[in-house]
Amino acid sequence: IKVVEHFLPLYVGTYSAAPYRLDFADFHPEKALGFLPHELDFTHLRMIWRRWKKKAKLKVFGRPFTPFGPEWLDKALSAVFRLKGDLVHDFRLIDYFVCLMSTDQSPALDGTIGNDIRLRNDLSCMGVFDSCMSPYLLYRNRACSAMGFSGFEGRYYSLFENITEDMGDAAGLQTLLTCLAFKYMFTGQISHASIPDNPTTESERRQIFFGSAIGIPTFFVSKNSRNQFMRKILSKTAKIRSSRRYPGYFRVYHIEYKKALIRILKEDASDLIEMMGLRQTIDNLFRRVDAWGDCAAASRLTRGILNEAGALSPMELTGDEFNDAAEKFYRETLRKQHMEEAFELVLQTAKDFEDNKIRADHHFKQAMWNLMGGKNVYEFIEPLKKQIINHCAGIEELKKFICILILLIYAGLIQSERQMHAGRENDPSIY
């Protein structure tokens, strides 16, 4: 998990996002910073806040200026000095509690059994967190004893502009990062000692993630950092220099850090990329990072919201106007776009079934016959598409459609298992 957290800035705004406009009056620190004071060390929090004020349109006579009074006074100052505020790439990650910061006594990720319970008890005694709640982490391992299965879940996803490309590539990259982390462990390249378990080191890597969500261009890393994996990443990062404002720190550009992460993936995970067939995913990832304005999810979602509002720039709109347009875009335009994507996949699968390209077992064929009575599945779904998208489909049609979906998913699983089995027989070494 500690290894994967270093790579998570690759996701923020790149694959998913939640663009949000803050007006000048919203820049009271206790409101704008959300849960960050409970997720970052105060040193990195101060750095982020200072850089955020510099990025946002809050300057009066060349100096950043934040609201300090009642709402009517803040609005008056905003009008007089034309203080616009800011656009945040992924405000959900700031406004939602996504991870717990460790305490000095109870690190959350030191590898000892029960560390999450000890941390929750510590934070509960401090009045920060309820010990009965699930431990919040950016990337969390599900306990088999509690869930009945094990695996990892990410809390860093917001809204996808495109399901098949954004979500599909994001899932592939998540699998790759998890496998790379295990590879580092198995080969002895990284141990718990490589990434110290203290709040400062934890905050140092997570500040990059939250800074990406805000959209600030730079972050700062201590020259004396004991995080060996971070030092490895920085050794491959371009345009690093010593900070003039913060002696003893390096100033690092977010975009260069992300490019360095991609270099490390190509070097250290080349075998995994080849085995998983993710070369195109990595190439697309570089394009998303390098051509942010055209390819990143945050940029595409922002353009969709502006089209909804009939504006050319987020700063042409007030916070309420932009965010209202965003809500309308998500509930109507984006929802329909996602459903159109889903129906394209369903219809293609139904067509493959009718053309006998899906070789399912007799259970599937019998269930489909009982459901459709021998009628064409594609011809049943195609006219139903518009009714479902526009919320006018009947109950019986919906029930039948849901059953068809379950059966098609089942057929896909059977087909995948057959392909994997054939792959093992052809080349057992890759498994």
Image (spheres, rainbow, N blue to C red):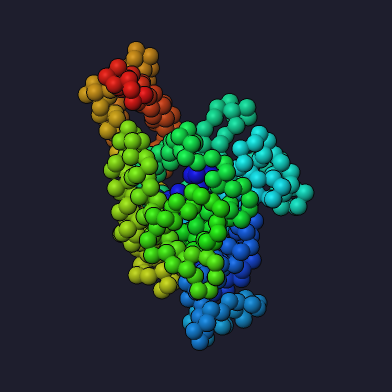
Answer above or below: position of 10 versus 299.
Answer: above
Depth check, front residue: 70 or 224 = 224
Q: Count how many numbered circles sit on residues in the image.
A: 0
Depth check, front residue: 186 or 382 = 186
Depth check, front residue: 415 or 107 = 107
Q: Residue furthest left?
A: 355
Residue 304, by quadrant, is: bottom left
Answer above or below: position of 277 versus 105.
Answer: above
Residue 252 makes an appearance in the image: yes
Q: Residue furthest right?
A: 125
Judged left or right of residue 249, residue 28 is right
Residue 154 makes an appearance in the image: no
Residue 315, by quadrant, is: bottom left
Answer above or below: position of 429 versus 110.
Answer: above
Q: Residue furthest top?
A: 362
Q: Which residue is drawn at 52% across and 32% down?
A: 151
Q: Residue at x 37, y 40 (%)?
A: 269
Q: Which residue is drawn at 65% across and 36% down?
A: 112
Q: Residue at x 41, y 74 (%)?
A: 316
Residue 147 at what x, y percent from top left? 59, 29
The C terminus: image quadrant:
top left
Residue 122 at what x, y percent from top left? 74, 47
Answer above or below: position of 62 versus 20.
Answer: below
Judged left or right of residue 254, residue 385 is left
Residue 6 at what x, y percent from top left? 48, 49
